[in-house]
Amino acid sequence: MLAGCTNNDSSTHTGASAAGPCPAAPVNVVVSVDQWGEIVATLGGNCAKVKTVLVSSSVDPHDYQPSPADASYFSGSQLVVVNGADYDPWASRLATTTVPKVPLISAAAVTETPDGANPHLWYSPSAVTAVADAVTDELTRLSPLAAGYLATQRRKFTTDLKPYNALIAKIKAAATGKSYAATESIFSYMADALGLLDKTPAGYRRAVANETDPSPGDLNAFRTALSGRQIDVLVLNPQTEGSLPDQIRTAAQESGVPVVDATETVAAGAKSFQSWQIDQLTSLARALNVRA
């Protein structure tokens, strides 16, 4: 149920929309997953050469077994960025064993999120800001000659996030108190930021959190909540394979409950982190009858 359906190729890039040439040699950065890789590349611009290990991964990051090539990426790094919260433990281990003196930024550490908590921190608007600040601060420390350039990139990132933050505020103002249910926990931080009530049946939610299959009773409770229109919108990860999400999607459609897709990794074709998130939030606003 938890396996995705896209490729797991790594990628190397410098950030899009960079503010001209870098006044110093680019910093070599390794990022574990593309949800943060997109952000780090934008913040670094031409002053960072970013290698993201898992891009649109078909492998659960919890269970990923790094290859010798992955280890070689880490060995040449000057900065490592991971998600943490037990989402990508292999990346922290590689950093510790391969480059123990290289600074490591963990989104979980930055946001004080403990292991065992919901690790999908890129769906938290406050976490995005906190990680962006930490990355810019560390890049500046590593490349003081690029301080002005990196400050410009950070300001540009803030500007680029304005439509994202504005849409969040608009949905929150118009839809607070409305409910959602989800087949996975990936959207929970964003749902909290939007003021939506989680009506996912408790048994189903516990099963997903424990990475076990929901019981027939849990599935029946989900179908009953949908058919009774106790749920305003269903949030579903289209990258998840298996019959259970398909059954729940079908039950929602048959009950007239709108379905909104929210992917775990950056959607194929998305130009940036912001565009990925805005597309999904726009779909959610439409489902909740909020003018976006």
Image (cartoon, rainbow, N blue to C red):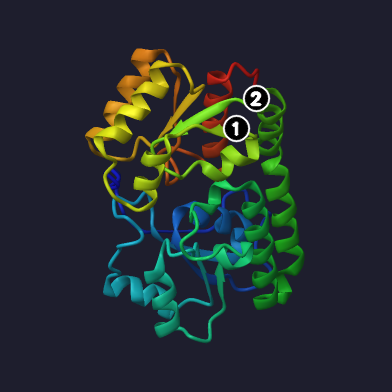
Q: Residue 123 vs residue 156: left or right?
A: left
Query: Horizontally, is 12 left or right of 156 in the view?
Result: left
Tell which circle, 2 or 1, labels the residue nearer the N-terminal end: 2
Circle 1: residue type: Leu
Can the viewer see residue 193 in this picture?
yes
Q: Which residue is mark 2?
A: 175
Give the number of the disc on residue 173: none
Left or right relative to 62: residue 275? right
Q: CA distance from mark 2 to mark 1?
A: 7 Å
State the residue at coordinates (38%, 14%): 255
Answer with left or right where residue 174 lies relative to residue 50: right
- Give the residue displayed 25% in from the left and 34% down from the top: 216
Residue 71 is situated, as x and y percent measured from the top left of the image, at 35, 76
Against 111, residue 3 (above or below) is above
The percent position of residue 80, horizontal first and vertical second, equals: 51, 71
Dividing the picture into quarters, in which one does residue 70 lie? Answer: bottom left
- Tag 2–tag 1 contact (CB < 8 Å): yes
Return the mark for residue 196: 1
Query: Vertically, is 245 above or below 227?
Result: below
* Residue 59 location (% of width, % of height): 29, 54
Residue 140 locus on image (x, y percent): 70, 71
> Is residue 272 in view?
no
